[in-house]
C-alpha cells in the first residue's frame, strides 16, 4: 500500500478514505446566462465553465439546474472555445474566453 501525506486524504460520503490527485492545472472562465430583454438570469444556477490546462487543452462543463433545489446536472461538452465571446459587465464590452 502506497503512503500519501494526510493533507491529501479526503473522506467519501460513505466514510472511505480517498486521495485527492491533481489531474492538471491551468485557468478557467465561468459565465452565466441572462435574458437579453430583462437582464435577469435565465435560470438560477445555469452556467458554463471553460477550463484551460497549462498545455493548452480546453474542456467545457455546462451546468443545468434541476428541479430539486441546489442540484445541478453537469455535462461535459466537446467543442472549441474559438470564436466564443462573452459580455464583460464590469468593463461593458465583449471579450474572448482566453
Image: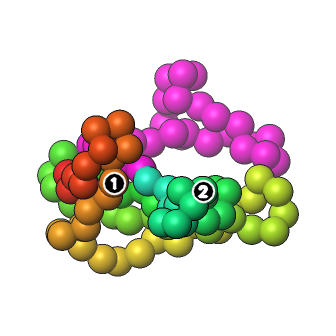
How many numbered marks appear?
Answer: 2
Mark 2 to mark 1: distance in Å?
Answer: 14 Å
The picture places residue 67, in percent across and down from the top left corner, at 81, 68
Residue at the spot 24% in from the left edge and 54% down from the top edge: 94
The picture places residue 2, in percent across and down from the top left corner, at 49, 37
Identify residue for label 1. 87
* Rendering quarter of residue 96: bottom left
Scheme by which the image is coloured: rainbow
**Vertical comparison of 12 with 65: above or below:** above
In magenta segment, residue 98? no
* Rendering quarter of residue 63: bottom right
Identify residue for label 2. 40
The picture places residue 42, in percent across and down from the top left corner, at 61, 65
Residue at the spot 53% in from the left edge and 72% down from the top edge: 75
Stretch in magenta: 1-30
- Left or right, residue 73 beside residue 62: right
Of 16 and 84, the residue lying toward us: 84
**Vertical comparison of 73 with 56: above or below:** below
Amino acid at each position: 500500500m502506497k503512503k500519501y501525506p494526510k493533507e491529501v486524504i479526503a473522506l467519501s460520503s460513505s466514510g472511505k478514505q480517498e486521495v485527492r490527485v491533481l489531474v492538471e492545472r491551468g485557468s478557467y472562465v465561468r459565465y452565466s446566462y441572462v435574458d437579453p430583454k430583462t437582464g435577469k438570469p435565465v435560470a438560477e444556477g445555469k452556467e458554463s465553465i471553460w477550463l484551460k490546462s497549462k498545455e493548452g487543452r480546453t474542456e467545457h462543463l455546462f451546468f443545468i439546474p434541476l428541479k430539486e433545489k441546489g442540484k445541478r446536472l453537469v455535462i461535459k461538452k466537446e467543442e472549441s472555445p474559438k470564436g466564443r465571446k462573452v459580455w464583460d459587465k464590469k468593463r461593458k464590452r465583449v471579450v474572448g474566453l482566453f
